[in-house]
Every structure is written in structure tokens, then in C-alpha cells.
Amino acid sequence: MTITRRAMLAATAAGGALLAIGVVGGYLLRDLFRIGSNSGGDEMMSGMMGVGSADMNRYMDLFNRHTEIRRTVEQIAGGVRTTTESDSPDLVAQLQAHVSSMYSHLDEHAEVSCMSDSLPTLFHKESAYQRKLTLTQKGVSVTETSTDPAITRAIRAHADEVSGFVRDGMPAMMGGMMGG
């Protein structure tokens, strides 16, 4: 089989593009894994996301331990009912603290701006939907509903994004950061 010059150039360009994506992704991952060190990476990432370093450290631990978390999502009229739990007591505490913190951010109009296509809508329209958080023995149960179809779509989209984070961990987070 012979390879044309054009095919070789196309393959070389594709390989270079993949290499560039890998390098950029590697730098992003390197900075993410520095969180909590004295590198200043935690301030950079948490500032980009609109959260404090305690929230960022919690996010990272939840992503890193996603296989220890289980989640169910039930579509209900106008929204969803989700249950997110773990058998690990420290993860239970982190899940409860995370969701409580997110609702505090909503109440304070302190937008969390990264890793989600749906969160901006939910933050900008926080008064257009109802939220109920119930702490369970193993985690959290959340019911979110709205009478506005656009908000209902955002609520359901966010539930899907979080389910992806629980299912896939860091790759889902990186996809969210890269807009994918």
C-alpha cells in the first residue's frame, strides 16, 4: 500500500493537533492536581470557578472518589428528584456539605461558573425554581422543580451533568471545562 503525500501531511497535521490537545490537557490536569499545595493553583482554579478553595478541594475529592458514589435521578413534573449517596461516612459528609454550599451560593447570588452548561441558567434564574434538600443517612436527596419549561430543561440538564460527574469522574469534569 502506498501513501500519498497529501495523506501523509493530513496524518501529520492530525497527529500534531492531538499532541497539542494532550499537552494543553496535561497542563490543565497538572494545575488541578496542585490544588491544596502551596503552588497557588487552588486560588487560580477556585477563582476561575467562583468558589472558595474549601469548595474546590471538596469538588476534587468527590471527582477523585466518584466510584464510591451512587446516584439516581427521577424525572418528576417540572423537574427532578435526585438521590446521591455513598457508604463512606467522609464522602457522605462531603456530599451533604457540597449541596448545602451550592444552595448557599444560589441564595447569595454567588455564581459558580465552571464545569456546567446549565448552572449559569440556574444561577441567573434562581428565584424561578423551587429547591428542597433533604440530608439522608448516606447522602442527599434533592427535589428541584419549576413551572417555566426553560428552567425545567436546565434543572434536568444539570441533573444529567452531575450524573456524568458521578459516573465518569475527572474526564466528565474536563469535558465540562472544555465545553464538551
Image (spheres, grey):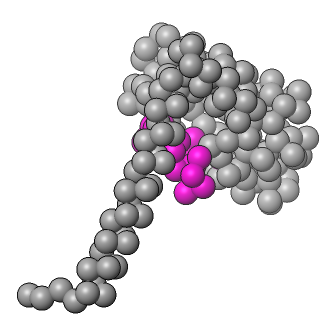
Q: In which quarter of the image is residue 67?
A: top left
- Measured as percent of width and height from the top left, residue 134 is found at 68, 23
Q: Quadrant of the image for the N terminus?
A: bottom left
Q: Height in image: 54 above or below 84? A: above
Q: Which residue is drawn at 62% across and 43% down?
A: 115
Q: Give the range drawn in magenta.
A: 158-180
Q: Height in image: 39 above or below 141? A: above
- Measured as percent of width and height from the top left, residue 180 is found at 55, 57
Residue closest to the eye, 4 or 43:
4
Q: What secondary structure characterizes most of the magenta part?
A: helix
Q: Which residue is drawn at 70% across and 35% down?
A: 49
- Measured as percent of width and height from the top left, residue 156 is found at 66, 51
Q: Does the magenta stretch include residue 64?
A: no
Q: Which residue is drawn at 62% across and 21% down?
A: 40
Q: Height in image: 61 above or below 63? A: above
State left or right for residue 119 relative to residue 140: right
